Amino acid sequence: MGHEMILVVEDETDIRELVEYNLIKNGFRVTCTATGEESLVNARTLLPDLILLDIMLPRLDGLEVCRTLKNDPQTADIPIVMLTAKGEESDIVRGLEFGADDYITKPFSPKVLVARVKTVLRRKKDNPTDENAVINIHKIAIHPGRHQVLVEGRELDLTFTEFQVLRLLAQRPGWVFTRNQIIEAVRGDDYPVTDRSVDVQIVGLRRKLGDCGRFVETVRGVGYRLKE
Ligand code: CA
């Protein structure tokens, strides 16, 4: 049984060793590096199953590493979990838009880190590809083909854009989507979408979802997600 390989990119020795220790303890194979430059080489030669990537690195920072790897077809599918400090929301937003899959804010507990790594690896495997499959989450049923949303059997009167936003969030519960990612996903429907109008869509969506509206969560400074 092959154990999954995690590439850890972190210039702070204490954190790097803590992460390494806990991943190995949980059965992962681990390769560590302290620089962005070396992490690019490692990613391309080792093709790890997941990369834990510190954002604040000397010279080539984590955002650049993320962008480079996600733009390279050879490494684009490797999930990246960013390690960030509190207050770096704008970096988180940029990282997610470059294609990072998730982020963890320092300081974090090893337990949370390992759980997050496992979740991202599991999501990668599940990878729901059927665009028209009905999504059932909480008490909400989303029928993509029919553009229909039912809450406990009651049909909601959503606008097309509200429907698109809800479907996007529901396709990856627990994932944070930035406003730009939401705009990208609903664009092309003749609707002038801006940051502000995303917020307006969310307000409308929550109201129409009634009790279930609380599952549409705001992630301060980053974006929105549907509670897992
Ligand atoms: Ca750092």
Image: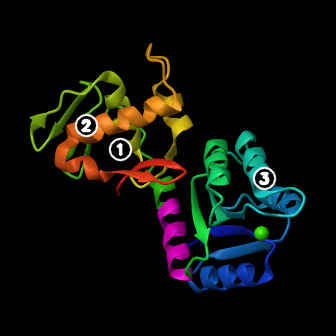
Q: Is the magenta stretch mostly helix, strand or loop?
A: helix
Q: In which quarter of the image is residue 108?
A: bottom right
Disc 3 residue type?
Answer: Val
Q: Which residue is drawn at 65% across and 50% down?
A: 90
Disc 1 residue type?
Answer: Ala
The residue to which callout 3 is attached is: 65
Res 58 label: none
Q: Where residue 23 sits in the image (x, y, percent)?
A: 61, 79
The residue to which callout 1 is attached is: 170
Q: Indicate yes or no whether the magenta region holds residue 75.
A: no
Q: Magenta stretch?
A: 110-121
Q: Where's the C terminus, which quadrant?
A: bottom left
Is 207 drawn above or below residue 192 in the view shown?
A: below
Q: Residue at x 48, y 73 (%)?
A: 115
Residue at the left extreme of this rendering: 153
Is 28 drawn above or below residue 141 in the view shown?
A: below
Q: Where residue 61 sits in the image (x, y, percent)?
A: 81, 57
Indicate which disc, 1 or 2, sits on the residue closer to the N terminus. 2
The residue to which callout 2 is attached is: 142
Q: Which residue is drawn at 26% across and 25% down?
A: 147
